[in-house]
Image: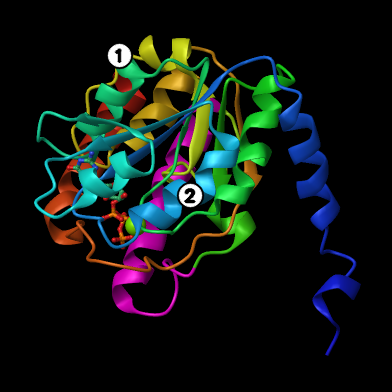
Amino acid sequence: MLHLKEDPWYKPSELEAAWEEYKQRKLKVTVVIPTRNEGEGVGDVITHCKPYADELLVVDGHSTDNTREVAESLGARVILDNGKGKGDGLRVAINAAQGDIVVFIDADYSHRPADIPLLVVPILRDEADHVVGSRPKGGSDELHGDINKFMRMIGSDIITLGINYRFNVRLSDSQNGFRAMKTEMARNLGLKEDITTIEQEMTIKTLHKGFRMAEVPSHEYERRFGESKIKLSRVSFRYVYSWLKYLITG
Ligand SMILES: Nc1nc2c(ncn2[C@@H]2O[C@H](COP(=O)(O)OP(=O)(O)OP(=O)(O)O)[C@@H](O)[C@H]2O)c(=O)[nH]1
Ligand SMILES: [Mg+2]
């Protein structure tokens, strides 16, 4: 078997080049970590995000474990959302962020902090206003393997397809929580979703208002600690409803 580094497709140098460019940035970056009962994993995520953050903002959904204590002990700024869900949390964080660019990354170690420069560099170069980490391009451990993952993948692909034909773009992922955008733009999108449907809302409204979307490959790992907060059967209606609503009205 070919060793990874001998594989012509393996390009660690791209990551290094992005990191070198990232270090020269003139814009400030707020890394936002939404949390709800992530005491086990959030410390590790904060530690790995620190080198990339001018401001580290943890927006907490009223955790009943030690999430906020862990985050504060590691020097993160910790704020509370209004208790309505992850989307509410991201909206609160967008208003509170002090950086010019916000990066959203989950607390369960699903996303790779080392990919943050890849997400942000297109914004620094003024080539994009909103950049999503693509799971189809970077691979995902959460979209393949069992029926629940399969349903997530199909649902996500159908939603992305609708967005692509509506706005004449060719995105591969409209849903991933790992993304970066200009803070000012995020504040002007008029975001309303309280749950994880905020991610597709961000994508649709960015395109609707004529801002520039881009995507970069990023691998999604299976949640490493704690429990999933998503029950597909409970949220699927909201996904379809908000998808159609924002596609039509923006
Ligand atoms: N602020 C805030 N964050 C939340 C809330 N619910 C979930 N989160 C965080 O949002 C991120 C994504 O939630 P997950 O439960 O991992 O959702 P998911 O990634 O779609 O599902 P799994 O990884 O399969 O569990 C995690 O960091 C959660 O801790 C909430 O009500 N408020
Ligand atoms: Mg997760």
Q: Which residue is mark 1?
A: 190
Viewer-nearest residue: 218 or 190: 218
Tell me if mark 1 has few (under 14), some (14-19) or many (20+) residues whose alpha carbon lies within 10 angstroms of its own.
Answer: few
Name, please, the residue furthest toward the front. 73
**x and y, in percent, of residue 181 in the image:** 51, 24
Earlier-in-chain disc, 1 versus 2: 2
- In the image, the segment drawn in magenta is 141-167
Image coordinates of residue 206 in percent, x first then y, are 46, 21
- The residue positioned 58% from the left and 29% from the top of the image is 168
Horizontal and vertical percent position of residue 14: 81, 48
In which quadrant will I find the N terminus?
Answer: bottom right
- 188 versus 106 height, above or below: above
Q: Main secondary structure of the magenta part?
A: helix
Q: Under tag 2, what secondary structure?
A: helix
Under mark 1, the amino acid is: Gly
| Ligand 1 within 8 angstroms of badge 2 C-beta | no
Quarter of the image holding residue 216? top right
Nearest to the observer: residue 48 or residue 117: 48
**Along the line of sight, the residue nearer the viewer: 144 or 184:** 184
Query: What numbered label is drawn on residue 47?
Result: 2
Within-10-Å neighbours for mark 2: few <14, some 14–19, many 20+: some
Q: Is residue 162 magenta?
A: yes
